[in-house]
Image (spheres, rainbow, N blue to C red):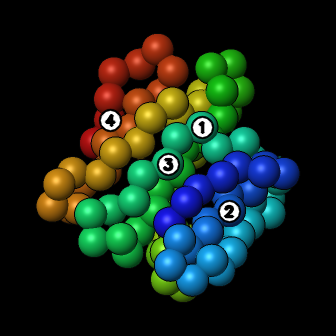
Amino acid sequence: MKLANFNKCLTLWSLCTLAVCRLAADELGQPTPFRAVSFSTDGKLLAAGYGEKDVPGGVVIWNAAEHSIVRQITGDIGVSTVAFSPDGRWLAFTKYDHPPEV
């Protein structure tokens, strides 16, 4: 899979089939510039962080196969990084100028 953030939505390209899939930011209620993305090790989940240092943000977790939101976490400032643990059971993320959260 290849990822891009055009028109403030997340776009996925399958490198095997060249199929294009968009994970619509309008599900979040507004166009959203994503800053960080991470697939779980099994490829089933995709986490994306959004927002900026002085703009509210959060993390959205999608079911990659069904293109549906599994969970959304919102906060008062943007998320700069996201990462799944090697076993895929945990997601860590950092907000701008803050320590990581798990």
Give the label on residue 11, or none.
2
Residue located beneath label 1 in the image: 35
**Badge 1: how crowded within 10 Å, few (<14), some, or many (20+)?**
some
Using the image, determine if residue 86 lies above or below residue 80. Answer: below
Q: Nearer the viewer, mark 4 or mark 1?
A: 1
Marks 2 and 1, how far apart in space? Answer: 13 Å
Q: Residue 86: percent from the left, percent from the top?
A: 17, 54
Q: Looking at the image, is 47 positioned above or below residue 66? A: above
Q: Position of residue 34 (x, y in %)?
A: 64, 44
Q: Amino acid at mark 1?
A: Arg
Q: Amino acid at mark 2?
A: Thr
The C terminus lies in quadrant: top left
Select label 3 or label 4 by which is in front.
Answer: 3
Label at residue 37: 3
Q: Nearer the viewer, mark 2 or mark 1?
A: 2
Q: Which residue is mark 4?
A: 101
Q: Residues within 10 Å of mark 4 (few under 14, many from 20)?
A: few
Q: Identify residue type, mark 4.
A: Glu
